[in-house]
Image (cartoon, grey):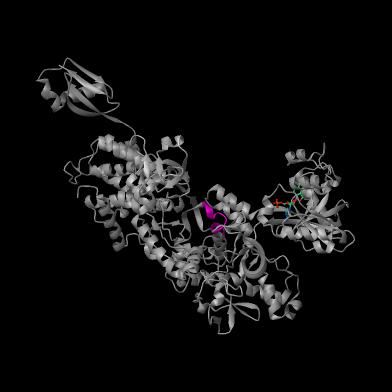
Amino acid sequence: MSEYNFNQIEKKWQRYWEENQTFKARANDNKPKYYALDMFPYPSGAGLHVGHPLGYIASDIVSRYKRTKGYNVLHPMGFDAFGLPAEQYAIQTGQHPAITTEQNIQRYVEQLKNIGFSYDWEREVRTSDPSYYKWTQWIFMQLFNCYYNYTSDKAEPVAALIKEFEQNGNRNVKAACDDDTPAFSAAEWQAKSELQKSELLLKYRLTYVAEAVVNWCPALGTVLANDEVKDGLSERGGYPVERKRMRQWMMRITAYAERLLQGLEDIDWPEPVKEMQRNWIGKSVGAELEFAVEGSQQKIEVFTTRIDTIFGVSFVVLAPEHELVKQITTDAQRQQVEEYVTVAKNRSERERMTDVKTVSGVFTGAYAINPISGDKVQIWIADYVLAGYGTGAVMAVPGHDTRDYAFAKYFNLPIPQVVEGGNLAEEAHAAKEGIIINSGFLNGLEVKTAIKAGIARAEELGVGRGKVNYRMRDAVFSRQRYWGEPVPVYFKDGIPHLIKESELPLELPKIDAYLPTETGEPPLGRAVDWKYDNQYEYELSTMPGWAGSSWYWYRYMDPRNDAAFADPEAVNYWRNVDLYIGGSEHATGHLLYSRFWNKFMYDLGLVPEQEPFKKLINQGMIQGRSNFVFRVKDSNTYVSFGLKDKYDTTALHVDVNIVENDVLDIDAFKNWRPENADAEFVLEDGKYNVGMEIEKMSKSKYNVVNPDDLVERMGADTLRMYEMFLGPLEQFKPWNTNGMDGVHKFLRKYWRLFHDNDGNFTVSEEAPTAAELKSLHKTIKKVEEDIERFSFNTSVSSFMICVNELTQLKTNKRAILEPLTIILSPYAPHITEEVWQQLGHAQSISEAIFPAWKEEYLTENTFEYPVSVNGKVRAKLTFAVDAPREEMEKMVLTDEQVTRFLDGKSPKKIIIVPNKIINVVV
Ligand code: ANZ
């Protein structure tokens, strides 16, 4: 073989790896483990475009590199296979979503295999496979059977909680539970009915059913999680989302709020992702304070982070949904209040939080008493106060708080002075920290001290206490859909019961259509004869998309185990993920839920590490590079880019696959669509230049580039290196197929190093020169340092420089080319396997050891002098750069080549130009 026949080489090695199970991972105590994981994809019908493999290529390079560094690498791939698109397609076509999913997965696998990833394919998992979701259901059951004990600060069995209730009631229990959990004694507990006990226990369980205000999407017929709603629309499909009260399965993620926050300190993740999680968790340290309602027994509890501003309270605001609103509103204000409540209800929480411009609210007619100053203030309702946060009520301090200030201005409410030296609210905002309070016992204190003093006083008076609040809410876990995991629960007399563990998996039943029933039940309501023990209703909603992805990295450790989610030995060996690569869009969804489930599994002793993903990298998105043609209005004439302004034209997207270097292939364009067949063109220099713009890669913009086509044209190794060459992994960058040529030429050049002019593979066994060693060793050093800091684009440049240097040096020495081949192999695995074999190795190059670079070769300490005799170069001699002159002269005069041309005469002069040339004058 003489030509670089990449198609043939790549197919050959892909087959070899598969047949020889080259990348099969086995636990091995003699080697350190390394777990490199890609966020597994949802197999969509459109297949992969060139943007998808970017992260996969990076993690594959690291995996292959780590193998050559002596690590035992686990590098798996699988599919997040439940989800809406397959179900939407099923609704349209009647085809079972399992069939579509299977087809899409096959296509994905084929595309991935084409790129030569070193996955251990035998470990592939699919979340929609019953043998997989059996364990998703199993984890759900463990959550149902546990509550969160704040005393031990971990999840513990509900069975132990019941024992405690029987003996002492819930007096001594410090646990995560619903806000409305009543206090009860042992006797009261024992007097309760089974149903009442069950309802009480649901207030503690880590997964529970409860009435909740949820994001209901009528068009999709399902509830969505907060992170699946963007600006009031569903993330998938962009349909309107409403607020609705429904009975739902919930996950008590709030129990883990503090640990989820603290755990961020221990992981090497991008700071923006950590920050998003911190904001999502939204810890705030403050106080709860009771305001009495004048002329009533009722008390309004507010949550405040600034109890130090208590003397500046000028009114109290309740959320429109607050339960006291009805009771305290005076008759005179009732109609206005009711109207306002109706309007506010239809605005989403997000909208209310982010809308800072519109000021709206209504006076209830009632008054509250400031528990510390004794002042009487008005009670208002306004939708800037959220029902679901804190206590759903605030003490308004317009002297300090922007929203309170805007509200007070608008409704002409008092703006009391609380800051020494003036009552200008703007100044007060600007001051923020270190404000001196000019009020009562707080006078002269700094903010932090004043807060402490305020809480102490409130506690003394019995009107308040310190309180930590988290903005995060429990996660809704029900979806009124078909294509998800069934919840392993049935209902008996209104009480939810788990099915037996031995009955797992609870498989999805067959149904006749993938739509809600006539009575509005979820699709599972259509299943015929689907009852537990032939009589009890199963839960009809299914689990959300994030259930299966919240623990999948463990299944890869032991994917076919039928007796456990994974064998403990395997779990204790692989532990957690060393490198996780995926998109940043999962910051507050998947990446938070996974940490939650992981911590729960850790509490149960099922897994050895608190955090699932040690290091996270978010790969940037590859954007599309769209091309445009310009059609003259009301005609079928297209003008070239440079002439478009002379005509009245419309820019139209044109398929990027019929454009090269921004020049349109006119024949291909005529064939692209029937209406183009008789198109006419106004050209520039005989060419049609197209317009260009960077946009999201999408079918509708005709800018999708398919990796398969590129692999076919230039090979997977070129594609892999080019994707890395585009720029830093984390960066967003546009795709431009044109640049691929350069990388392809580089690989051809590398290939040529091993071949003589007749195309025969040949390497020399000669010892390398200093220049060759230097070129190699600086590349080894650079590439190693680059991979260790996940900088791949810079490595590609180094390879190019090295191959150029070696080409110039006409190197074909094994001692140089063999190590070069090893360090190139993570990037271009196929071509290097081929060369490796030709170099005479029987094992895959993935068994080779990454060469060590040597400092001594990096500095230039010798120089190869051309030696001329009377102006004609007759020999080449290498000297240390600091060699003494006499020694050099002696060597020159004894060199055989030189003496031949001296004709026995002794030279008149020897001129030595350091590091340049030696000239012998006879
Ligand atoms: C008085 C005060 C004075 C406040 C001041 C702030 C500044 P974070 O930090 O986000 O927790 N608040 C409390 N519950 C609320 C609710 N349900 N909806 C809207 N706002 C609410 O914010 C806590 C602060 O937000 C609380 O402290 C309260 O206003 C307001 F100079 O009380 B503060």
Foreground: 413 or 33?
413
Q: Furthest residue to the top?
A: 908
Q: Furthest residue to the bottom?
A: 534
Predominant secondary structure in magenta?
Answer: helix
Foreground: 910 or 809?
809
Query: Residue 202's quadrant in the figure?
Result: bottom right
Q: At 63% from the left edge and 58% from the top edge, which residue is drawn?
A: 257
Residue 621's place in the image compared with 364, above or below, is: above
Specify whether 780 is left or right of 753.
right
Specify whether 911 is left or right of 597.
left
Q: How many marks?
A: 0
Rendering coords of residue 468 (x, y %):
71, 56
Q: Which residues are magenta?
A: 584-592
Q: Furthest residue to the left?
A: 903
Q: At 73% from the left edge and 67% from the top edge, which residue is drawn?
A: 180
| Residue 585 falls within the magenta-colored stretch | yes
Residue 575's place in the image compared with 815, above or below, is: below
Rendering coords of residue 886 (x, y %):
23, 21
| Residue 291 falls within the magenta-colored stretch | no
Q: Is residue 849 visible?
A: no
Residue 543's place in the image compared with 53, above or below, is: below
Query: Residue 738's quadrant in the figure?
Result: top left
Q: Is residue 54 visible?
A: yes
* Quadrant housing the C terminus: top left
Query: Residue 537's quadrant in the figure?
Result: bottom right
Specify whether 750 is left or right of 156.
left
Foreground: 776 or 219?
219
Rendering coords of residue 638 (x, y %):
40, 42
